[in-house]
Image (cartoon, rainbow, N blue to C red):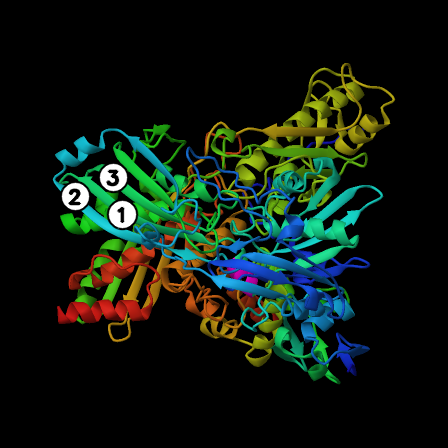
Amino acid sequence: MKKTITLFINGQRYSHEVEPRLLLVHYLREVVGLTGAHIGCETSTCGACTVLLDGKAVKACTVLAVQADGRFVTTIEGIAANGSLDAVQEAFWNEHALQCGFCTPGMILTAKQLLAREPNPTEEQIRHGLEGNLCRCTGYQHIVNAVQAAASRSGD
Amino acid sequence: MATTTTKSPALLVGQSLRRREDPRLITGTATYVDDVKMPGMHHACILRSPHAAARIRGIRTSRALEMPGVVAVFTGEDVAHLGPVPCGAALPGLRVPAHTVLARDRVYYVGHPVAVVVATDRYLAADALDAIEVDWEPLPAVADPEKALEPGSPAVHPEWPDNIAFTYKQEGGDVDKAFAEADVVVRQRLVNQRLIPVAMETRGVVAEWKPGDRQLTLYTSTQIPHLVRTLVAGMLKMPENRLRVVAPEVGGGFGSKLNVYAEEALMAFVAMKIGKPVKWIESRRENFVATIHGRGHVDYYEVAAKRDGTILGIKLKLIQDIGAYHQLLTPAIPTLSILMMPGLYKCKNVRADLIGVFTNCTPTDAYRGAGRPEATYGIERMVDILAAELQMDPAEIRFKNFVGSGEFPYQTATGLSYDSGDYAAPLRKALETVSYKTLREEQRKAREAGRLIGIGISTYGEICALGPSASLPCGGWESATVKIEPGGQVTVLTGISPHGQGEETTFAQIVADELGVSIDDVVVLHGDTSLVQYGIGTFGSRNTAIGGTALYFALQDLKEKLKKFGAMLLESDDVVWNGGRCVCMKSGKEVALPEIAAASYRAMKLPENTDPGLVATRFWEPPNFTFPFGAHIVVTEVDSETGAVQILRYVAVDDCGKIINPLLVRGQIHGGVVQALGQVFYEHAVYDENGQLVTGELTDYAVPKASYIPAIESYHTETPSPVNPLGVKGVGEAGTIGCTPAAVNSVVDALSHLGVRHIDMPLTPEKIWKVIQDRRTA
């Protein structure tokens, strides 16, 4: 029994018939064709699939596509405006906050929400705020540096 | 042909450039295996054994075949013609069980693949898995390697009831004499627990068969695309030039993708059988049982020494948990531990007895450091235990035993030739950084006040740049092709297969400096066997030291050819290559690289004995390993009421030879250290007595999170390696090698006045709390 859903993803309207059990992350990746959200665990532990749903970071592997009906989704593909990188993307690049890159889209979106909540976070607040996103490559320190750099840049 | 003043641009090697691979990764536009999509693509799911040991009395697939969207179900009988999953390591007397692609009449570990379902959609394939009926007859299993050695233990493979996969001995010097002459002998059992690598991207394969071309393409998340091609072609009994293997963007490996897995041949088989592309993506739950594990040692150490702290001899009985099968390099990994037994110390008398033991568990194999973290943990824990026994300072005993800076190349008791080093330098720097004397004083005062502060030191050496071909089953050289295109831009095809290490950047830095071109004109390609000449791949901290050196020599060849064309164009014999131009030493006239490139491809006129074009390929065989080293100091505080450990300070001083890009080196150190802190405090692949993996998900297996981890202070000394012209040694595994003993030494130091001598990892609060309670009641 399929259901028609309509979502606004990265500022564009999408409407599809989907099965109620389809996960949001699979909808984004397989139906819409936005593969920037990655699947690392399917238990909402790793955070590689993090997207913003109505501005809040959610793990798209444990949200059904039908739950996102009528709502606004931002994925990693949607944050660079007019070809110029978002401040957090730029900071991740400058600070070498990624290696294999698999966790990076989720990490960047979580960092964006963190900075939206707390524009000048302490290192402790950053580390706490990133708890839901695992990275196996960087040891987190350059990620923390990047969030701090993005914070000071947006504070300029 | 312009005459201008030649300027040498600033060299890029040694600079912290941000990575050239990052734009695709930070914008979500990189292509990992699961991002590969093809018309008509089907999806596969794999049924795996829920039992650690069981006979398969029968499999019924008919209900699954009737499920919507299902096009095929294959079992062990269907793939019986495929060759076995390969073990590349060879040791005398090695017992190699038949490792079929799918189980046939028996399973040997939880996760053992039994059947594959192929459907039009991944949800439908997953649904159909539940409809396959297997008639199991569970059998007794054994998961603990020491129990597996006991008489009467269940036999993992019935043909070898003693569960011994192999034994291996190595001896150097006169160990018995050393122990007979010793003033003191310390002994300790050390467990290096089984770990799960947890690359953030699980494994995955897409297979596409083009019957018209008789051409098969495998996209697979691997560190070694060329070796996968050779070995999977062998399993499929297919000519190697009919198989193309692509490692697209790879989301972490850490050794777990330095392998050839059953699923790679299985998806090739499925694609050929159904005539459609097929994708299999490992779930995280599968990844925990179907991808190799790491470590899994029980080590019995004995160290003999003089009263002044001079180490005379080391004995090691090493029990390696193999798991149910040998994967690609399984039996070779613990032999690396033996090679590194003496660490940085001048001990010439060593004896190692290694037993590889089959268990009903996932196979172990290379995991970041691969045998070297285990060895370093062993010697560095034992040196601390010895220091405690002799009431010596742990720094002092290390200085006393180091190989001296004037003794290189240094022949070890295990047959290695250490290339270069100044082992005292990083330790001195680390001690200065933490103000060691003051810190000890603070520790004493804190102890008096009832606080438990620990200071832990490790000084590690490692074997990197794996390695000379004699040391590996697959060849240990590396390759590079450099093409200067007709327009003057440079394309590098490297045989390594980086997946986060950053060689698209560091290799471009080397090219820019050597040829004098802009880094923006350099493209580094890798990971596609149809594009790149044969290569070995990425593991053993070998990318820059071996792959970079192959690149360096190819660049020298090209410079020679550029000079020949330049001399022709300048009509002079006396030319030099400088800053991207060929300069006539007499007239000062010069010709720039794009003009030379155009002339070489246009080929209206050619220098004598010179072919058109500007392409050079080098396969470079290293004459030796490289031996990085360093010193890590960890300061911890243990909460006596909860057993929780807080890291107050982490100082790492690493010497990885010449540094190409300090920013990337720092990233490697941070990542390695944190991965090792995972082993020290959180991670343990726990099997119950029936062989069930208790820590079978990320919810139960604790990978470090950002909030668990302190800032790492990373410093360097820089001792060039004489093994290669770049002077580089390798840094990918240093963090995992240096960290574990430093951190455990620190916690043990915090508790030493209570009489604590050793605690096995992971150092969970519960374990530490119990130790403190035991000591208080004792």
Q: Mark 2 points at which residue?
A: B185
**Tag in front: 1 or 2:** 1
Q: Mark 1 points at which residue?
A: B300
Give the quarter of the image for residue B347: top left
Instruction: Please say if B201 is above or below B385.
Output: below
Quarter holding the C terminus of chain B is bottom left
Label 1 sits on what residue type? Tyr
Q: Mark 2 lies on which chain?
A: B
The residue shown at (64%, 27%) is B556
Task: Assign a secondary structure to mark 2.
Answer: strand
Crowding near the residue tagged with mark 1, few <14, some 14–19, many ≥20 C-alpha atoms within 10 Å:
some
The residue shown at (28%, 55%) is B745
Give the quarter of the image for residue B719: top left
* Residue B177 locus on image (x, y percent): 17, 31
Task: Indicate yes or no whether the magenta region holds residue B590.
Answer: no
Q: Mark 3 lies on which chain?
A: B
Quarter holding the N terminus of chain B is top right
Q: Earlier in the sequence, mark 3 or mark 1?
A: 1
Q: Mark 3 points at which residue?
A: B314
Instruction: Please say if B286 is above or below B329.
Output: below
Using the numbered discs, state the Cα–Cα distance from disc 1 to disc 2 in whole angstroms.
13 Å
Crowding near the residue tagged with mark 2, few <14, some 14–19, many ≥20 C-alpha atoms within 10 Å:
some
- Comparing B682 with B273, the one in front is B273
* Residue B209 locus on image (x, y percent): 77, 48
Q: Which chain carries label 1?
A: B
